[in-house]
Amino acid sequence: MRYDYIIAGAGSAGCVLANRLSADPATRVLLLEAGPEDRNIWLKIPLGFGKVLTNPRLNWCFESEAEPHAHDRREFLPRGKVLGGSSSINGMIYMRGQRSDYDMWAQMGCSGWSYDDVLPYFRKSEDNTRGSDPFHGTGGPLTVSDQSEITPISRAMIAAGQDMGLPFNRDFNGAAQDGIGLAQVTMRRGRRASTAEAFLKPARSRPNLDVQTRAQVARVMFTGKRASGIRYLQGGRTVEAQAGAAVILCGGVYGSPQMLELSGIGDADRLRDLGVAVVHHLPGVGEGLQDHQVFRLRWRLKGRPGTFNERTRGLRALAEGMRYVTTGRGVLASPTNPVNAFFRTRPDLATPDAHLQVFPGTYASMQDRRLDDHPGITLGPTLLRPESRGSVHARSADPRDAPAIRTNILGTTADCHAAVRAMKFARALMQTAPIQPFFHSEMLPGAEVRTDAEFEAFARETGGSNFHAGGSCRMGPAGDAMAVVDPRLRVRGVEGLLVVDASVMPQLVSGNTNAPTIMIAEKAADMLLQNARDSSNAA
């Protein structure tokens, strides 16, 4: 059980690293995943996200602690527990964020992470069906494609956004993010392109890559202050594996801080309270959690707008199933939010601070995602740069216990004001002329909600995570006491240990987090391979 690299977590980052690091046949790589193989059929069919988002066999199904600014509600926080991680259960939207996000990382002291620095890694991953250009690549493992169809309600929503003054944007990952349009998606010929499919599957036959599923990491093992391996639980037994070059934590924004704390890295007092021996005092572990906050508004529609509601029932569902089997197209090949918009909640802002996600369907709750029996649409105005900060910490010394997660949603006055303005924008959009042929009635929050105070009350009653969390093991320069990793993603104060996932983001990106996480892993692999070359040359 000796390897060069041990990767803990086979999600959006871990599968990328497994592919890139094992490309050298002389390098032995172990990839550990707590969940099963990604064989469930609903993981392959794009619209199957509704079947797996609450499936505890494939999903950690985390819940937050009682949120003090949201009536002590507990937020549902899904995360993939399967090969491919959250890329196997997400909405398949390919979104990178804004140029300024990464330039801000560099300004915060994270050298090598400006937009110009990271763009080559975004392009490296891509096989974009539109072809290569200065912003996009071809020939990479990850298929990024256009949606296979545009429904009547999608066309109406784009026209409505233009009526509201938003420009049409053909490429949110191009020169500018502003505007409204159809998102590109991580799909290949009508099937989900998770990182397990795109990166891991082509590498599985390599004899130097060992993939172990249903392997729950218990802790990182140390020799002095150097990470020397990992202890994990599998099939009722405890297994140990040794790492010669590095242990890489890819447990995600919730899993990686928990693994660090259970391994003795974190706030020393907190670790002692857990009964964990302190390896290194690092108070930033688990602190500074950031997440996009979404407030879902729902409308009943009329006619035949082409929403999920009417296309997944009765004879239409049967017809759609046959269409998908024969062509790979139709409603079953749809992403979660076909139409997206990025806008400013205040005119003085330099770049958009809100993301409008258009889900062509309605349902009663996130946990019970049964679609309504009438046409409907859900608009999710989302705060891209909330001020609120939360935390993630191990609840006990048992790795099988879910961590304690606090999102602190709506924890600042500024966030509340931005949420109200974003929800008002969504309502105004639904009142434009292009929507009227389909408009029936507002379901939530309801026409009786009119004042800022009433909108804020609705936000506190119903708002939640948009599942785009980051920052719980954030990157920072030397001298930043709360930084967990340095700009080369090495855990501070120890050797041979890295964190590579969305938890290292020093500031959350202004968009979906899957594409940026893949980029982070691409860059981390490049840095690790360069380290290996430097060591070889020095020897």
Image (cartoon, grey):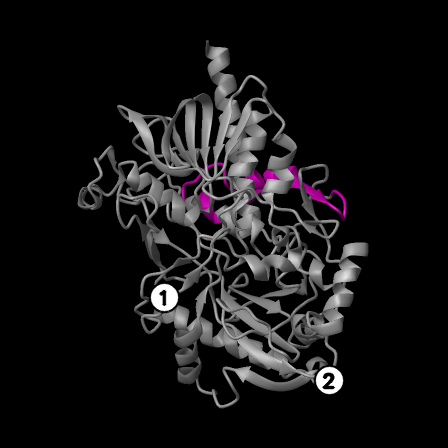
For the view shown, which residue lies furthest in the right direction? 326
Q: Which residue matches tag 2?
A: 437
In which quadrant of the rendered view does residue 198 lie?
top right
Q: Nearer the viewer, residue 405 or 513?
A: 405
Which of 413 and 212 lies nearest the eye of the viewer? Answer: 212
Q: Which residues are magenta?
A: 104-132
Callout 1 secondary element: loop
**Cα distance between the residues tagged 1 and 2:** 38 Å
Q: Is residue 522 visible?
A: no
Q: In the image, residue 192 lies at what x, y percent?
A: 66, 50
> Mark 1 highlights which residue?
74
**Structural crowding at the residue carrying mark 1, measured as other residues with C-alpha within 10 Å and reported as few (<14), some (14–19) or many (≥20):** some
* Image position of 294 (left or right of 48): left
**Relative side of 234 to 193, left or right:** left
**Residue at the spot x=30%, y=48% of the render?**
394
Disc number for residue 358: none
Answer with the quarter of the image where residue 91 lies.
Answer: bottom right
Magenta highlight on residue 449:
no
